Image (spheres, rainbow, N blue to C red):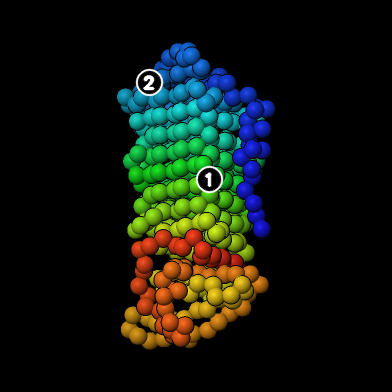
Amino acid sequence: MSHTPSPISLLALLLCSGGAGAQDFVLSTPGTATWETIATPDGTQTVFTINDNTVFDWDQMLLGADSELIFNFVGGDTVTHYLNGGGTHLIGGDVTANGNLGFFAPNGNLIVTGSITADSVTLATLDVDAAQFAGGGAFSLSGGAGGALRILGDLEATTGDVLLAGESVTVFSQASILAGGRVMMGGGNDLEVLADGERRLSQNSLSGVVFHSGQTRASKIEVAAGAEVMNNGLLGEGSAKVFIEVGESGRISNQSQGMIASERVFDGEFDAAGTLIRPHEGDASTVIADASLKIPALKRPDGSAVSERRRITYSAPMSASADSIRDRKKPENSTASTGKRDSSLVSRSSFFGLRGGAKQKR
């Protein structure tokens, strides 16, 4: 079983890294920005005036807890930050903007313990083309040295999206993520983000993990990883739509404290029978024993049968698209699913898992 890193070990790493204030940077797009830094009692405050789409190159980002970066857009709409060092970058203070912000650390780790508020927020330990990212269309994320992205603070996209990407993405229980658009989390070293569509995030690698234990709220949430997605927090609520996808032989699991909004789609196959379970075709009942899964008869809208009721035994507890509270109210001899979606959240006692080759539906 996979485990997320301890916040205590991360704290020790940060103490070794310093974190007193933001380090020196280079403006790579001359004439697009000016700034002023003032000392505060415990840190610094730097106010940037942005005149056009801007690119900054940082040797290392170490923004202390009492320091602040403010990006005031009077022109353009996007600032791209390249965090170039091979060590650990820290955003421990407050970052605010009335435009789009992206922080990319393709050769190191990135840890956020402070807060970032902007129109849209992108954090990645992968590389990106700055012009493509700022263009407002599709863009790719790739390469990098397999750095870790760790979120322990607060992220808010006031009107747009929050995107988290890297070989390893961990959202700790302390973290809160809120987006006026959608939240996307990608684990892997080859990701693509589309400009629009029902599904905008795709990954094309066999490695990569996303561990989520925080509180994430948006109308749409997409999580894609090559190897594993684990949820132990809140992913969406109410009528939110949640899409989770893994690569070949990938694994999706929801831990005992995890809750996922009722509108959810999992891309993957159960390895035992190879039966693809899609929530829009019918629900599988919740776990009835430590190693068994009861699947009711599935029917199409015209009443014709898709499959008969059956019970499958696994080496680990598994179920798909289950609402355990609703299922406990059903008679034991129930033989058909209504196909009706329940607007309540997944019960804290429910558990689901998917294994096998993911089917990408675009």
Q: Position of residue 73 (x, y in %)?
A: 34, 26
Closer-to-camera residue (181/199): 181
Would you call the spot at circle 2 few (<14 residues within 10 Å), some (14-19), or many (20 or more)? Answer: some
The relative height of residue 63 versus residue 120 in the rendered view (above or below) is above
The mark total stands at 2
- Helix, strand or loop at label 1? It is loop
User: Amino acid type of disc 2?
Assistant: Thr
- Residue at x-position 57% and y-position 70%: 318
222 relative position to 181: left or right: right
User: Amino acid type of disc 1?
Assistant: Ser
Q: Which residue is mark 1?
A: 173
327 relative position to 7: left or right: left
Q: Which residue is mark 2?
A: 49
Would you call the spot at circle 1 few (<14 residues within 10 Å), some (14-19), or many (20 or more)? Answer: some
- Residue at x-position 63% and y-position 53%: 207
- Residue at x-position 46% and y-position 42%: 176
Q: Nearer the viewer, mark 2 or mark 1?
A: 1
The relative height of residue 288 versus residue 27 in the rendered view (above or below) is below
Q: CA distance from mark 2 to mark 1?
A: 34 Å
